[in-house]
Image: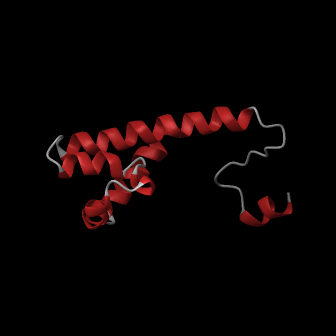
Amino acid sequence: MYNRINQRVDIMMQEGLLEEAKNLFPNKELNALQTVGYRELFDYLENKTTLDFAIEEIKKNTRRFAKRQITWFKRTENSNWFDYLTDATDIIKK
C-alpha cells in the first residue's frame, strides 16, 4: 500500500497539485485547506521547506492517515474489504 501511496502522490504532483496549491494559497487559512497535501505545499510556498521535502512529507503524512483509516475500519464490524483490483460490479453486488 505504501508504494501505491507514493506513486499516487508523484502522479498528483505531475498532474498539477503544486499549481492547484498556488491558486488556493491566498485562502490557506480555511479549514477545508488544512489537509494532507495542501499543508505541506503551503509550507513550501512560504519558503519553510524545499519542494522535495514537502513531497516526502505529503507521502509520509498520507501513509499515516491511511494507517489510521485502516485501524478505524478494522474496529467497525460491518466493513467489507476488497482488493483494489476487484471488479466494481462485484463490489456493488456485495
Residue positioned 47% across, 38% down in the render = 63
* Residue shown at the point (26%, 43%) measured from the top left: 54
- Horizontal and vertical percent position of residue 9: 39, 51
Q: Report the front residue among 39 and 70.
A: 39
Residue 53 in the figure: left or right of residue 39: left
Closer to the camera in the image, 87 or 80? 80
The quarter of the rendered structure image containing the C terminus is bottom right
Name which quarter of the figure residue 26 lies in: bottom left
Across and down, in percent, residue 51 comes to 20, 47
Number of on-image labels: 0
Q: Using residue 5 as the reference point, say whether residue 28 is left or right of it.
A: left
Drawn side of residue 51 relative to residue 60, left or right: left
Q: Quadrant of residue 90?
A: bottom right
Q: Is residue 45 above or below residue 93?
A: above
The quarter of the picture where residue 33 lies is bottom left
Residue, x 14% and y 46% (percent of image)? 47
Residue 56, given in percent of the width and then of the height, sits at 31, 40
